[in-house]
Image (cartoon, helix red, strand yellow):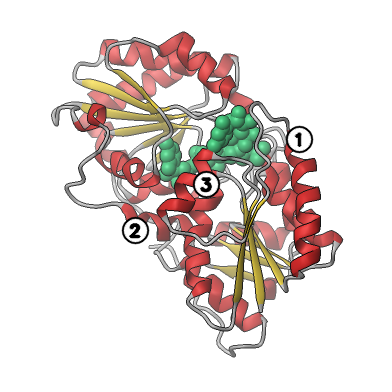
Amino acid sequence: MKVMTVFGTRPEAIKMAPVVKELLCHSEFDTKVCLTAQHRDMLDQVVDLFHLPVDYDLDVMKSGQSLYDITSRVLMGLRDVFAKEKPDYVLVHGDTTTTFTAALAAFYQQIPVAHVEAGLRTNNLASPFPEEANRQLTGVLSVLNFAPTETARANLLREGKDDGRIFVTGNTVIDALFHTVQEDYHFEDREIENIESHKRVILVTTHRRENLGAPMHHVYRALRRLVEAVPNTEVVFPVHRNPLVREVVEEELEHIPGIHLVDPMEYEPFTNLMARSCIVLTDSGGIQEEAPSLGKPVLVLRDTTERPEAIKAGTVKLVGTDEERIYQEAYQLLTDEKSYKSMAEAVNPYGDGKAAKRIAEALLYVGGYSSEKPSKFIAE
Ligand code: UD1
Ligand code: UDP
């Protein structure tokens, strides 16, 4: 069975890496990897870390690219790759413009699409933008759906998907995470390694398109107030490469004592920094899945989330982008032990480290290579 995996951004690469590795372990698969390179250096960091074999690289990234740029370049690039390779399945991940466009390009050649991390929904097309549309559109085009959780499966069933074509696998990000976090990790970056052990680290990331501009200003002002107000607290902020993010970060946060602005970190030091941190403030999707596993309270800098499981478990809270609200919520966690403890319990609602194995088993099952259905992921 020829399976072509297509991805283009950092989070897709992190979450597809365990899948590619697993496919390569089975002789029934002819495994091909095509990068769109919607991201470049942030993608390459992950491809190198996991030693992923790359067959095609569309190299589409341009600085300050628009959605039109990515969509048109990926669509045309994949037309030729798919026509040449004629895969039996195209595997896409999540909700980026690469994801949707790859699904569309495969559909135009009537190649079956299998969607990893299927069924996440906010049901609000404006938030996150354009990801909610990307994942719904990809869902329409997919014949196989790898839902990470029961909630995601229920969303797909509500949309009329055939239950026999949905497999609840857990999220592959937990497979990746289990491979990278280590006890007694030492950071190569001296700035991070030198943060004294009694200092509490607030780990921050921001990149959502709907937060560009004014919302990001508000978030960063709250950070400035926090490091001033709470003693022994330092912010580490790996700044996304998007120039529209960097502009605001520079304006609001450069040269503030206690705030470390660093480049996007490689996955291994990043997850180990998460493990060393006290709380996480982020608008990321993947980090909402990883941090609960490490028992780190997360304040989500968004108005909606497609990941309600950790909110239910009590380790993640949606706080939006209002400066005062972020300041108050973070201040309370940092100064009130009871509040902190109530959010700092390690939970694993998103995976058990075996998602990639279930995905490979499901492909073998639907392809007629195995009569055994994969086990279902059941959250603790
Ligand atoms: C994209 C995805 C988003 C995902 C995020 C993960 C879309 C529309 N957005 O958003 O769903 O959550 O990736 O990070 O698919 N850049 C670099 N080097 C890199 C990566 C980015 O310089 O390695 C800069 C470029 O100037 C690029 C800009 O960042 O034009 C924005 O990248 P883009 O992929 O368009 O959007 P993201 O905000 O990264
Ligand atoms: N991540 C990383 N280095 C960083 C910031 C994040 O390796 O400096 C990882 C993080 O652990 C998670 C993924 O990147 O697995 C999340 O990517 P991002 O926030 O860019 O995208 P999203 O998940 O929101 O789509």
Would you place residue 194 above or below residue 266 in this image? Answer: above
**Disc marking residue 337:** none
Mark 1 surroundings within 10 Å by alpha-carbon count, few (fewer than 14), some (14 through 19), many (20 or more): some
Is label 3 within 8 A of ligand 2 (CB to nearest ligand atom)?
yes
Sequence order check, earlier mark of 3 and 2: 3
Residue type at numbered disc 1: Asp
Looking at the picture, how far across and down is residue 331, in whole percent?
A: 31, 20
Q: Quadrant of residue 28?
A: bottom right
CA distance for labels 3 and 2: 16 Å
CA distance for labels 2 and 1: 35 Å
The answer to whether marks 3 and 2 mark residues whose Cβ atoms lie closer than 8 Å is no
Looking at the picture, how far across and down is residue 313, in whole percent?
A: 40, 48
Dot 3 falls on a residue whose secondary structure is helix
- Please tell me whether mark 3 or mark 1 is closer to you in this view: 1
Sequence order check, earlier mark of 3 and 1: 3
**Disc marking residue 69:** 1
Q: How many marks?
A: 3
Sequence order check, earlier mark of 2 and 1: 1
Dot 2 falls on a residue whose secondary structure is helix
Q: Quadrant of residue 31?
A: bottom right
For disc 3, the marked residue is 11
